[in-house]
């Protein structure tokens, strides 16, 4: 009984997941914008850019709108994921 392992559920921080996901999505978005700018004939990056903005691709408004959309979607995903994960990990521990 004294040698039983201690099980503690893992709890995620909303702020940590939000910042991490925001950084990840913005870096991917900017990388895709750079690929679209440097290799305009390559169509693989344009679809990702078009998901987050209605403005013309590679315009200043499009880049700002796309980055802000990525920030909003990252925090929305974090706001849904973190409480669900914390609830499930608490019950499974």
Image: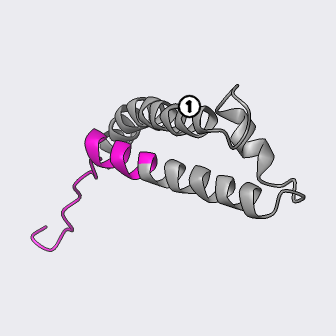
Q: Secondary structure at mark 1?
A: helix
Image height check: is 4 above or below 53? below
User: Which residue is found at the position 34% from the left and 47% from the top?
Assistant: 19
Q: Is residue 51 magenta?
A: no
Q: How is the image coloured?
A: one colour
User: In the current view of this chain or complex, which residue is farthest to the bottom?
Assistant: 3
Q: Is residue 51 or residue 42 the one in the foreground?
A: 42
Quadrant of image for the N terminus: bottom left
Q: Is residue 26 left or right of residue 31?
A: left
User: Which residue is found at the position 87% from the left and 53% from the top?
Assistant: 43
Image height check: is 57 above or below 27? above
Q: Is residue 58 or residue 28 the one in the foreground?
A: 58
Bin the neighbour count of mark 1 within 10 Å (Cα to Cα): few under 14, some 14-19, many 20 and up.
some
Task: Tell me where residue 33 appears, x and y as whole percent.
Answer: 66, 52
Task: Tell me where residue 66 appears, x and y as whole percent.
Answer: 58, 36
Task: Tell me where residue 6 appears, x and y as whole percent.
Answer: 18, 63
Task: Tell me where residue 72 appears, x and y as whole percent.
Answer: 46, 30
What residue is shown with label 1? 65
Name which quarter of the figure residue 81 lies in.
top left
Q: Is residue 23 left or right of residue 73?
A: left
Magenta-colored span:
1-22
Name which quarter of the figure residue 90 lies in.
top left
User: In the current view of this chain or complex, which residue is farthest to the front?
Assistant: 60
Q: Is residue 4 magenta?
A: yes
User: In the current view of this chain or complex, which residue is farthest to the left?
Assistant: 2
Q: Is residue 2 visible?
A: yes
Q: Is residue 15 or residue 48 the one in the foreground?
A: 48
Q: Is residue 82 left or right of residue 3?
A: right
User: Which residue is found at the position 19% from the left and 68% from the top?
Assistant: 4
Q: Is residue 85 left or right of residue 5?
A: right
User: Which residue is found at the position 52% from the left and 56% from the top?
Assistant: 27
């Amino acid at each position: 009984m004294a040698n039983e392992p201690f099980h503690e559920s893992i709890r995620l921080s909303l702020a940590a997941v939000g910042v991490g996901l925001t950084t990840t999505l913005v870096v991917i978005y900017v990388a895709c914008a750079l690929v679209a700018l440097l290799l305009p004939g390559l169509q693989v990056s344009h679809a990702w850019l078009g998901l987050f903005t209605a403005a013309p691709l590679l315009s200043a408004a499009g880049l700002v709108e796309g980055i802000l959309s990525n920030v909003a979607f990252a925090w929305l995903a974090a706001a849904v994921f973190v409480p669900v994960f914390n609830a499930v990990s608490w019950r499974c521990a």
